[in-house]
Amino acid sequence: MTATAETMTAATALTRTGTPRPTSSRLSVVTTERRHVPKRSVKPDPTAHLSAAQVEALGRELDALRQQVFDSRDERDAAYIRTVIAWQRGLEMGSRAVLLFSLFPPAWVLGTVGLSVAKILENMEIGHNVMHGQWDWMRDPKIHSQAWEWDNASPSELWKHSHNELHHTFTNVLGRDNDLGYGIMRVDEDQRWYPAYLLQPLWNFINMCVFEYGIAAYDLEIGKHMATKTMDDPELREGTKKVLRKIRGQVTKDYVVHPLLSGPSFLHTLGANAVANLVRNVWTHSVIMCGHFPEGVETFAKHSIEGETRGEWYLRQMLGSANIRGSKAMHLMTGNLSHQVEHHLFPDMPSNRYGTIAPQIQEICERYELTYVTGTLQQQVSSAWKQVVKLSLPNGTTPRAAAAGLARGAAAGLRRRVRPA
Amino acid sequence: MVFLTSTSRSRVQQALRPTGDALARLAEAVATPLVPSDYLDLVAPLRAGADLRGRVVDVVPETRDAATVLIRPGRSWRRHLPGQYVRLGVDVDGVRHWRAYSLTSPVRRPDGLVSITVKAIPDGKVSSHVVRALRPGTLVQLDQATGDFVLGAHRGPTLFVTAGSGITPVMGMIRNHLDELDDVVLVHSAPGADDVVFGAELRALHAEGRLRLVERHTDTDGVVSPSQLDDLVPDWRDREAWACGPTGLLDAFEEHWAAAGLADQLHTERFRPVVITAAEGGTVTFARTGTVVEADGATTLLDAGEAAGVLMPSGCRMGICFGCVLPLREGAVRDLRSGELTTAVPEDGIRIQTCVSAAAGPCDIDL
């Protein structure tokens, strides 16, 4: 650590218009006061027991842990990601080769399973993590956040903005982090309820099945543009062009070129590719739901992050994320997002290291009396779905009361129809 | 066997071109969003048309701190001229580093291999790795050979003045052209007899009378100085000269030749990479926008650039989103979180996060 980082808080820079603008307070761990901005629900502050000094100490401890891992990155880490990439590409091409004969049921099954796994690995352990800059330190121009393009409807450039920048900076901040329900769902009691949310279990199911396209629409912020009637925004038009170009390439590959190459197996290969994409959509959607939606994950008031220090930022990341417990294979297939807490603390740490620091992070949470949310995949998926169902209703409403209310409302509506005022 | 005349061959090529283009487009459609070479590189990294790479075939110790690395270059390798160097990209502790090394092999080796000879310099991360840890089978990145420290059309009386690993480009010339040169004198300096890279080979050439070797051991005899040339090589003025070694030695010889009005007759090769010394803050140049700004050691490059009116890419402003990454063409920066120093020279292709990096000396940012 140098002293220079500490002096950053006081530093200001001039924008082009000449007005002073404070540089990011999160570059400093120095924490001198505790503040809490309550949410509408007035839920208690989960960090109320910590003093400013403790938050600062926590920040320094996590900084030191990060530095320790970053200093120890070496050729074994590099070999890890290169091996995963090589295996993934081999599996993908191998599966596609098998699918050339997908007319034969065993070839169809084998190829579809292989391609599904390859597509999942490509998005999760490789694409997501490379685009986070986890492997930039190798200085390999190909395995680099600025160069990577992934097998997904959303172009990497758009995704990096909405995911790396918005979601990872404003994690679980109400009104700032659009990942909280992706703008189509209510996943926290502090989000306002609208009748449209009644159908959110259905939205969530549909979104799960077409997840990559959901992500692309989400990265374009189509919802926001529709709400603010700015669909003619030139940036949106430019982004849409990029997305459509990307989708065209993806669709041509999976639903035209490879099926055509399969000749008489055309339809079988087309089906296999559709199934592989569906499997990946369902899997990634489920894993990602487990990251922030399960019961016990905290959200934060919009204005709570003003002047946030790095220690406070770390706190928010730990409390706003949930892990998945399971086997090594499961961790690999989730792209180590099963270590969501560790990933959110250190988004640019090589993913193969999350598992090794997890016990230390858990110990830190215990020592600072912070909740470390974790559970098996089954537990977390069902917890997240339960939240989606529960929060489709206004706070404190049972399904029975909601059904009764709906019946009354519908009946009232019907009555109004029959007897115009 | 069918022999095609050059015209008919080009006609065939022309006829095949549309097919080739269609195949290339098909391969691209199959591989998207990657490119076909991403897959081909896994199985045939040395094929024609691939980014230039090489595979280490052997590492042969020359002295206690120098070794010759035999490399099979990729198919795209173009033949080098003796005396030229090649930029070698090698991964040390998982991080890619680029260094330039002289080619020491005969140009037309029957097995098609090329060699570089590397001396491990103290604290030299890359040279030490190449000499002590590089293993046969390793893939390395290469650039085409380059450099103008070559004999050209010269075939007359020749003087080589070298010190330490400065012998390496000259060895390339000697191995390829010794018999075509009239009369060769090599004045070589090394700490002791055992430290002379290619010592046995040079002494054998001397014994056979194919060149005159003046071996100078600096541990006992001190560093060779230009004033001693009159004794060592009385006819040095009549010779075309090539010198390679430490900067101090080259400066002294260049002065000497210039003083004698013979500057044109001396060719030098400077080996030591640009040494970048770290400082607190520095002058930041945004080359493409033509903006130059003074930044202190506590101001991020992002803030410094914005304050100067440069339209900087930015994101989280805390080092996590990689939305502000820009190429550092040349210079040194310090990570404000860890104090870690990153230095870059042109062509290293080093990219930095401007939101957590401050200038640690002059910086040239590619924006």
Image: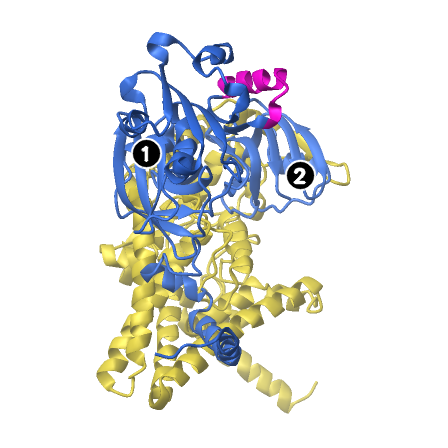
Q: Position of residue A256 (x, y in %)?
A: 45, 82
Residue B120: percent from the left, percent from the top?
Answer: 34, 28
What secondary structure is the stretch in magenta mostly built from?
Answer: helix
Query: Label 2, on which residue?
Result: B286
Letter of the blue chain = B
- Amino acid at pointer 2: Phe
Asked if the residues shown at circle 2 and circle 1 are in contact, with their CB atoms under 8 angstroms apart, the answer is no
Quick one: label 2 or label 1, which is nearer the N terminus?
1
How far across and down, in percent of the image, does residue B197 sit?
A: 32, 27
**Label at residue B129:** 1
The part of the chain drawn in magenta is B247-264
Q: Is residue A405 visible?
A: no
Rendered residue at 49%/32% (across/down): B342
Q: Chain of mark 2?
A: B
Q: Tell me if residue B254 is in the magenta stretch.
A: yes
Chain painted in yellow in the figure: A
